[in-house]
Amino acid sequence: MMLLSKEQIQAEREAKIRMKQTRLDTTRLALVYSRQSTKDQPIRNKEAALMQRDDLIEYAVVSYHWPEDRVILFIENELDKFGNKLAKPRAASGRLDKNLRPGLLEVERLVMDDKAGAIFVRDISRLFRDEDMINPPQFAKTCKQHHVVIITYDQEFDFNATSREDLKDFLEEAQDAADFLKFQRRTLHRARERAAITLAVLFLPGSCWMIIAVAMCLIPFGVMLWHS
């Protein structure tokens, strides 16, 4: 067996380290992407909107030393389907295909043109709530091919750091975001059922407040049994 020189051993060590490290190209653009599901959220929930926008820009500049003149902000709610700036924000659901979201399409275009180094988002649900899980793996593949890192407050997803499980973690977070929608729909459906049962009890002939009170206490258990 051929012995390696000190230089070759050092080169191998450095290669292994690079496989684990996130590699950022700050000479490229940092793309800050913001999306809220309903048109009124940016107005009513200003704190969340600021967290997605101003805080993320500061995060890129301060924590990652990204030059401020290379940070670009994309707010999905402020663009129409052609990418034109709107006077008032619109709804922008994460369930929509990326081809119906001009902000995300422009982000992807800059990635494919090798102009982006990183994408900053509050969490992966801002990018996708795709229940069919079609867009997330495609987007991750594009980012990998063009050496773009996705950065949230909790994690860096560098799909070229082959000794890590960033792709697996990214897809799991995307799946969790999609599953949350299913949970919301089930919860809403149960709430409607409870409301319907409550109304039915209130209008029962000869019912009294004691019976109503007991019935309302038992409703949650009845609904649970109904769905078990």
Image: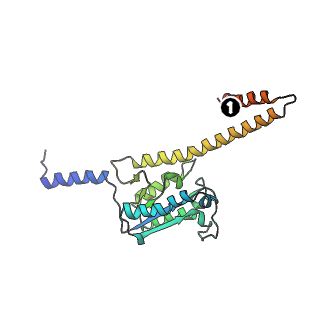
The residue positioned 48% from the left and 63% from the top of the image is 54
Q: Position of residue 102 (x, y in %)?
A: 57, 65
The residue positioned 47% from the left and 45% from the top of the image is 172
Q: Nearer the viewer, residue 180 or 23?
A: 180
Q: Position of residue 130 (x, y in %)?
A: 56, 50
Q: Is residue 12 left or right of residue 224?
A: left
Q: From this view, report whether residue 112 is shown above or below residue 181.
A: below
Q: Position of residue 1 (x, y in %)?
A: 13, 44
Q: Is residue 159 left or right of residue 203?
A: left
Q: From this view, report whether residue 212 is shown above or below residue 104.
A: above
Query: How many marks overall?
Result: 1
Residue at image mark 1: 220
- Which quadrant of the figure contains the C terminus? top right
Q: From this view, report whether residue 108 is shown above or below residue 224.
A: below
Q: Is residue 46 left or right of residue 163?
A: right
The answer to whether any part of residue 111 appears in the image is no
| Few, some or many residues within 10 Å of mark 1 (<14, 14–19, 20+) | some
Residue 115, quarter of picture: bottom left
Q: Position of residue 221 (x, y in %)?
A: 67, 28
Q: Is residue 202 left or right of residue 53?
A: right
